[in-house]
Image: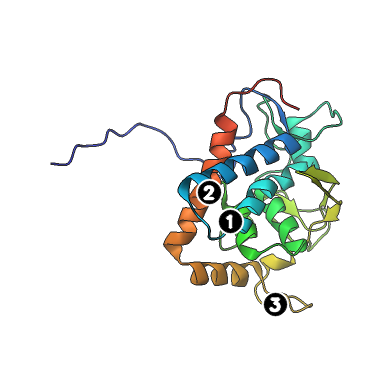
Amino acid sequence: AVVPVPLHAASEEGNDDDRRTFLHYTQTLVAHSCEVQAMMNELLDALGIPEYREELLMAALHHDWGKAHPVFQTTVNPDGPADLLAKSETQRRHARKRFRHELASALALLQTQAPDLAAYLVAAHHGKVRLSIRALPDEDKPESAGAKFARGIHDGDRLPEVQLGDAVKPALTLDLEPMLLGQSAAGEPSWMERMLSVRNEIGVFRLAYLEALMVAADCRASAAPKEVLP
């Protein structure tokens, strides 16, 4: 006999939801990033998973790199103290519709020659961006006519210098060229081509398992009891 599992009424996340950002505490970006990487390390040790360890730890440390984006910081840190924040008690909407910090994180990883798997896991950790990058119908368009945009990220947006773990990431300008189909002018494959290759090489179920590990590390770190953190 199979015992029925009770279903709890809960709505699925929408495109604008970001429940693991607006919590009951405030935390800096560097502290949260290190915490998620440490949690990922614990999970991998406990599960005895040797494969893809480097990519998973890289994804854990860099998953919120895009939260350094000025749009995100204006939302969580309107008074503008020096430290970049990852978590906030403030419940606010982003000034730019449909803004997704994880797309900025993934693009930054691509531009710094990170493995495609790490970029995929970062993009997918909220379930909003996976195999394709595309704009939504009601997004705010860039002021420059014809400029590329998707999920609230505009071509040419700039991320400031940020510390993640022991490394200081230099400021960089985000390039949305990978969202286009076909190779870039420099001969680089598109986002879709890269991510289809990752999926085909690893397999759908294994890739889903790695996604689940990424989400578990983020959720466990976000739910851990907090005192005053840097």
Which numbered marker is on residue 53?
1
The residues tagged by marks 2 and 1 sit, at their Cα atoms, a distance apart of: 7 Å
Q: Nearer the viewer, residue 47 or 61?
A: 47
Direction left: furthest residue: 1
- Element at label 3: loop
Quarter in which the N terminus is drawn: top left
User: Is residue 76 among what the camera can see?
Assistant: yes
- Tell me which corner region of the image, top left, top right, bottom left or bottom right, holds residue 195: bottom right
Characterize the local packing of mark 1: few (<14), some (14-19) or many (20 or more) Cα atoms within 10 angstroms.
Answer: some
At x 60%, y 59%, the residue is 120
Quarter in which the C terminus is drawn: top right
The x and y percentages for residue 98 are: 65, 46
**Residue type, label 2:** Leu
Which numbered marker is on residue 44?
2
Q: Is residue 123 above or below residue 26?
A: below
Characterize the local packing of mark 3: few (<14), some (14-19) or many (20 or more) Cα atoms within 10 angstroms.
Answer: some
Q: Earlier in the sequence, mark 1 or mark 3?
A: 1
Q: Earlier in the sequence, mark 3 or mark 2?
A: 2
Q: Could you tell whether 222 is left or right of 93 in the image?
A: left
Task: State the residue position of label 3.
Answer: 183
The residues tagged by marks 3 and 2 sit, at their Cα atoms, a distance apart of: 35 Å
